[in-house]
Amino acid sequence: MIPLLFILCFNPGERLEYEAKWSFLTLGTMTLEIIDTVDYDGFHCYHISSLLTSNPRLSFLFTLNDTIEVYTRTDDLLPLYYEEMINEGKYKSRSRLTFNHDSLVVNYDDTLFLELLENSRDLLSFWYYLRTIALEVGDTIPVNIHKSQENHEILCYVVEEKVVKTPLGEFNAVLVTPQTQGKGIFGSGGGMDIWYSRDEYRYPVLIKAKIKKGSIQFKLKGVRH
């Protein structure tokens, strides 16, 4: 059984702001926010959002304005509703997913129905879920994630502790590295490292998204409660 912290509640209004950098370039910003608590489909839920925007000074190279909205149950952080709005240059898309964890079905835009693994999470609320785990170096945490019409069985390795420097200051932090076998979302050709602060807030203070040419680093630069 995965050990959970005795406090599982997050505060509505929590807003985490990150700078996104690749090498010496500031690519843009990311904001993670717990907007409020809402009632959805008979459950009390957190309304969580993320906003990823590109640096306007790099508009001659690319523009990006991506938003994700998720409703997750407050007791176990399982997602019930997920909406993704992508605006990248001339490319725009929008998709809506509803999760039924009793029947193990996910519904895309009221048209496509797919099987779901038990206790499946989305990639956004997954970051929050790991904040509720008592992370200890050497632990391996299994998590199921549904992304882009595919189910993924993830193993999250708690690798090490160290001091992480961010624009907001230094944090004692623990590293979690999610991995899959083969070409999954954290498989060959990509990956992710997430550093969580060792204080009572357990913020993801540094997120590294690995790409073929290095990694994009999201470093915490601001917190609002």
Image (tube, rainbow, N blue to C red):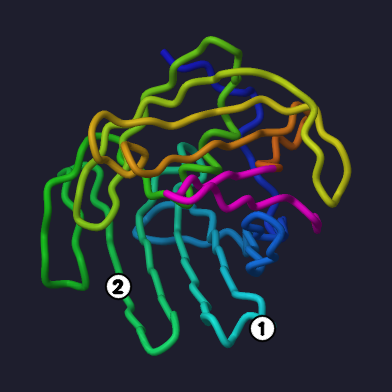
| Quarter the N terminus occupies | top left
Q: Residue at x 71, y 58 (%)?
A: 24
Task: Give the extent of the magenta segment.
Answer: 206-224
Give neighbour class at mark 1: few <14, some 14-19, many 20+ (Cα, 10 Å).
few
Which residue in the structure is indicated by mark 2? 95
Q: Is residue 15 visible?
A: no
Residue sitting nearer the eye, 85 or 11: 85
Q: Secondary structure at mark 1?
A: helix
Residue at 17%, 43% (x, y): give it: 104
Residue position for label 1: 56
Q: Against 9, is 26 above or below?
A: below
Query: What residue lies at 43% left-to-right and 32% top-to-bottom?
Result: 178
Image-based side of 144 in relation to 132, left or right: left
Return the x and y of residue 62 as percentages of the image width and height. 51, 80
Main SS of residues in magenta: strand
User: Which quadrant of the view contains residue 78?
Assistant: top left
| Residue 24 appears in the picture as rendered | yes
| Towards the viewer: 209 or 152 | 209
Question: Is residue 148 positioned above or below 7 on the image?
Answer: below
Name the image quarter holding the C terminus: bottom right
Mark carried by residue 78? none
Image spot of residue 2 (x, y percent): 46, 17
Q: Is residue 212 above or below residue 40?
A: above
Q: Position of residue 114 (x, y in %)?
A: 12, 54
Q: Furthest residue to the top? A: 138
Q: Find residue 139 and report its horizontal and vertical position in percent.
A: 50, 13
Is residue 160 highlighted in magenta? no
Q: At label 1, which amino acid type do we have?
A: Pro
Q: CA distance from mark 2 to mark 1?
A: 26 Å
Q: Is residue 17 left or right of residue 170?
A: left
